[in-house]
Amino acid sequence: MKKVEAIIKPFKLEEVKDALAEVGIEGMTATEVKGFGRQKGHTEIYRGSEYTVDFLPKIKLELVVADARVDAAVAAIVKSAKTGKIGDGKIFVSTVEQAIRIRTEEKGDSAI
């Protein structure tokens, strides 16, 4: 099993969710986060004072998938989240040792 974490632009959430559903990924967790990378941020004027907004709003998606479905999940995220502009985000894939469904106590791939 693999955990896929994707940081995407907020307005791409629905497109990514739909693209993942098309490849058979049923569950995920989405969290509103703030961050920056090469995009750095921007300056804004508030009540006549200029200030820098370093952290930009993003969405962090987390999903655990069977090893055989990782490539399809990553491809779906890339295709649907990509705008071609700086700040599109990143995807991280890591190994998951164990997954357990609390309700039924199923373990491993059957729990996801």
Image (cartoon, grey):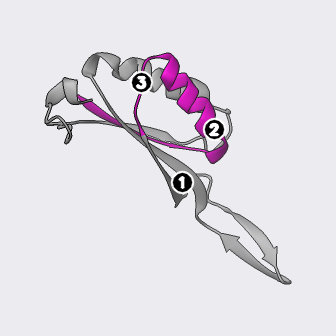
Residue shown at 15% from the left, 31% from the top = 106
Which residue occupies the foreground of this view, 10 or 87? Answer: 10
* Distance CA(mark 1)–CA(mark 3): 28 Å
Q: Quadrant of the N terminus?
A: top left
Q: Check disc 1 and give the amino acid type.
A: Gly
- Whole-angstrom CA distance, mark 2 to mark 1, is 18 Å
Disc assigned to residue 25? 3
Question: Tag 3's secondary structure?
Answer: loop
Q: Position of residue 61 (x, y in %)?
A: 45, 42
- Labels 2 and 1: the sequence-earlier one: 2
The tag earlier along the polypeptide, 2 or 3, is 2
Give the residues drawn in magenta, as a range: 1-28
Mark 2, residue position: 12
Question: Which label was assigned to residue 51?
Answer: none
Which residue is at the front of the view, 56 or 103?
A: 103
Q: Choose mark 1 or mark 3, whichever is in front.
A: 3
